[in-house]
Image (spheres, rainbow, N blue to C red):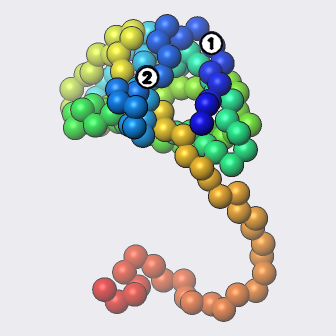
Amino acid sequence: MHIKLINYGYKKAPLRAHYNDAGADVHSTHDYLIKPHETVKIPLGFGVKLPDGFAAYVFPRSGLASKGIICEIPPIDSGYTGEIHAIVHNGSDSEYQIYEGDRIGQIVITPVILAEFSDEEFEERGATGFGASGK
């Protein structure tokens, strides 16, 4: 599948380390100092044109996640063509410096099921959760 990039000033396009990797590395467009337990929105310099039935997500990189630096993963809908941002959270107790060009996440494109919702009557199972099955 070919996904068209929309250039909002990126210096490095998303890039897979290996042809069969699920995610393609995305890079910071600026320097950021993220304080402990702070969340920042980092522009990536590009947008994407996704076909209907697909969504994109900026997932954490495993090396950063192991240090407590993670990307939140809200979906990027097919109708959104603005600049994509990585929402990066520092879950550690130390400041973390990101430099322009650093790999800060990985974009993953996935198919989605476009469900239709209704309020039809259904056989009620119960409203308890979190261990309600007795296990």
Image quadrant in which you'd find residue 55: top right
The residue shown at (40%, 31%) is 19
Residue at disc 2, secondary structure = loop
From the viewer's perspective, tell me whether residue 30 is left or right of residue 114: left
The residue shown at (49%, 7%) is 11
Give the residue type at disc 2. Answer: Leu
**Residue 38 visible, this orientation:** no
Residue at disc 1, secondary structure = loop
The residue shown at (53%, 26%) is 85
Closer to us: mark 2 or mark 1?
Answer: 2
From the viewer's perspective, tell me whether residue 13 is left or right of residue 6: left
Residue 41, image x, y percentages: 49, 25
Task: Answer above or below: position of 18 versus 72.
Answer: above
Image quadrant in which you'd find residue 98: top left
From the viewer's perspective, tell me whether residue 10 is left or right of residue 59: right
Quadrant the N terminus occupies: top right
Give the residue type at disc 1. Answer: Tyr
Given residues 97 and 25, the one toward you in this image is 25
Res. 8 mark: 1
Residue 87, image x, y percentages: 47, 31
Query: Could you tell me how far apart the alpha carbons at marks 2 and 1 are, in whole angstroms?
Result: 17 Å
Residues tagged 2 and 1 counted as in contact (Cβ below 8 A): no
Residue 101, image x, y percentages: 39, 11
Instruction: Tell me if mark 1 has few (under 14), some (14-19) or many (20+) residues whose alpha carbon lies within 10 angstroms of its own.
Output: some
Given residues 58 and 97, the one toward you in this image is 58
Res. 15 mark: 2
